[in-house]
Amino acid sequence: MNQVQLSPNSPSLEAATLYTIGVDIGGTNSEIGFVDRQGRCLRKVTLATMARQPFSLFKHQLVTTIEELMHDLGGQYQCLGLGVALPGAGAPNGDVRHPSNFAWPAFNIIEALSPHFSFPIHVTNDANAAAIGEKKYGKVKDLDNFVVITLGTGVGGGVFIDGQPLIGARGLAAELGHIVTVPGGRKCGCGKRGCLETYTSATGIRRTIMELIAEMGPANHGFNNLSFDQLTARHIFDAAQNNDPLALEAFRRTGTMLGTKMADLVPLFDPQAFVLFGGLTGAGPFLMEPVQAAFETNLGEPFQGKIPVYTSGVPYNEAAILGACHIPEFTN
Amino acid sequence: MNQVQLSPNSPSLEAATLYTIGVDIGGTNSEIGFVDRQGRCLRKVTLATMARQPFSLFKHQLVTTIEELMHDLGGQYQCLGLGVALPGAGAPNGDVRHPSNFAWPAFNIIEALSPHFSFPIHVTNDANAAAIGEKKYGKVKDLDNFVVITLGTGVGGGVFIDGQPLIGARGLAAELGHIVTVPGGRKCGCGKRGCLETYTSATGIRRTIMELIAEMGPANHGFNNLSFDQLTARHIFDAAQNNDPLALEAFRRTGTMLGTKMADLVPLFDPQAFVLFGGLTGAGPFLMEPVQAAFETNLGEPFQGKIPVYTSGVPYNEAAILGACHIPEFTN
């Protein structure tokens, strides 16, 4: 179905459009993009990840959706490959382990998907994919040393060193979400306590709202009638726009903690820039102002004023989808 | 003086021994080693660094000592180059900045030394040199991903990733001594507070003894009659061997803090092993037992039981001297 049929009297060979499929599997939603060689999404679909259900359910939906999209595109398009970005994926062989916001057990995503497709499949973790996307199409495309932090359901990290993503001995390096930020602090899905992700992810800021309700009591704020399950990061953003004191304080705490920890990564990686990516960055200055302030305050002297903190420069939050389409260029 | 004179009727060309000079400049003492191509020290001399005096004083002593040693060796030996390891050196061009235990201002060590010698001079920071030494001659010689932590007057880090030392955009990466371990904690020479080095260096454990005297009062311990200037890490080790309760507690706190922070580096670098190097490791189990315990306790599940923590496998504490002799092999 994905083969382009060209006869000698085809009007033009250039009429065949080559594309790659990039899939960004998040803890809540997953996005599928059909991406041409200029990095434009020809088609984009969002699926619910159902991360608390068995993987087979999501796999079925993913495969079916891709097949339908390919069918819709028709014979003028040729698929070059599939790139998958998901938390816990590290090793290039496709082994996935411990995605901490997922109920999926350890499995191999390439083995799971390859029976369904005839083209090559590549895998990396979601934050590495975002970092590759930023390197190819974002504000850091001319830099070789930078740190990307993804702020979604969880927190991930992608670190570029001398133009290559940091992978580590087991494919588990640059897991910035699981550095301990508050010793003995919040319980994390990874089994440890106090991990950065328990504070600065979308889930983390929802936990912070609960903490603030406990601290402040039934004060003048808009969160008294929302359960934890009902509460989303979007509610907190909307409330902040209405000057809700709890929402403003939640962003202040979240941004301060993130900026402080980012400064602490600087003597480790000596980066030229940071890029923040993912849903929570949609909060704009509510998040970014305390991030910037805490970051600069906590930088060592040789770095002060020298390391910009960007939000993703890739339009439509597509850094991870686009990055997933370029995995083979950045893995040996 | 450093030229080998060989006439056609020399008994044997092999009689000329090639060597490299490795210099490891520490906050207290500096070591000069004349190292043959098998990694053996032909000559070794220790100098006081006089880090609180102007650099010119130390430079004069260093140059004079090297010249004398070369003269002593005589014409049967040929020098291939000089490698210098010192804190704050990062960039391969020789720029040295902010050695936090030194009163030396920013300077260029290659420019300072090259007028005195006719052979090539290479520079890296002390911890990178130790990491190179461990990679060439130590327990990690078959590994490509590992972390070396130097525990001397300060704390330094050398991180190998895929067989290469992590350098960073400005030559300032892997500065493990300056990650914040206790937010708002002890004042550090780098200008920040709570850096790892303020707790787990030789200076750090001396500060911990002072803290313990404050906490415990004039109890049954052997530190009441020593000033901070008089107190050395050696005193603390000797006291620990005599079951001094303050000394034992100081090692327990130091090791626990170090092991905990080491575990927190694992999700960043995904290393195969750690190597601890430098004076404080001479304390053996007093330090290493709490390090090991805290390290394993704080590891995430995928890493538990899989990452050995070694003390240096290079004899005579020569890892940094030997590493300094191999800098060009590991810098591009």
Image (spheres, coloured by chain):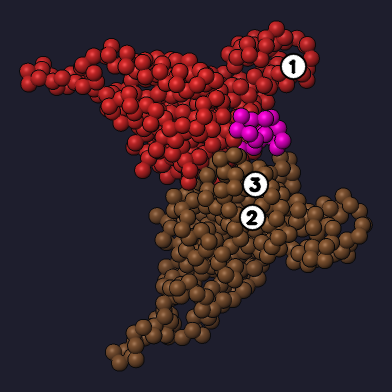
Chain colours: A red, B brown
What residue is shown at x 71% (from left), y 57% (from top)?
B287
State the predominant SS element of the stretch in magenta: loop
Kind of residue at disc 2: Val
Q: CA distance from mark 3 to mark 1?
A: 36 Å
Say which amino acid is labelled 3: Glu
Q: Chain of mark 1?
A: A
Contact (Cβ within 8 Å) of mark 2 with mark 1? no
Q: Which residue is mark 3?
A: B296
Q: Which residues are magenta?
A: A179-196
Q: At numbered mark 1, what does the secondary structure look like: helix, strand or loop? A: helix
Q: Residue at x 62, y 74 (%)?
A: B46
Q: Quadrant of the N terminus of chain B?
A: bottom left
Where residue B60 appears, as percent x and y from the top left, is 58, 73
Q: Nearer the viewer, residue B287 or B305?
A: B305
Which image quarter is the C terminus of chain B in?
bottom left
- Which residue is under mark 2? B155
Q: Amino acid at mark 1?
A: Ile
x and y, in percent, of residue A169 in the image: 48, 46
Q: Taking A269 as reference, is A315 left or right?
A: left
Residue at horizontal 44%, vertical 15%?
A: A47
Q: Is residue B317 left or right of residue A42?
A: right
Give the image quarter of residue A177.
top right
Q: Which mark is residue A221?
A: none
A145 up-or-down from A71: above or below: below
Few, some or many residues within 10 Å of mark 2 (<14, 14–19, 20+): many
Subunit of label 2: B
Numbered disc in front, either 3 or 1: 3
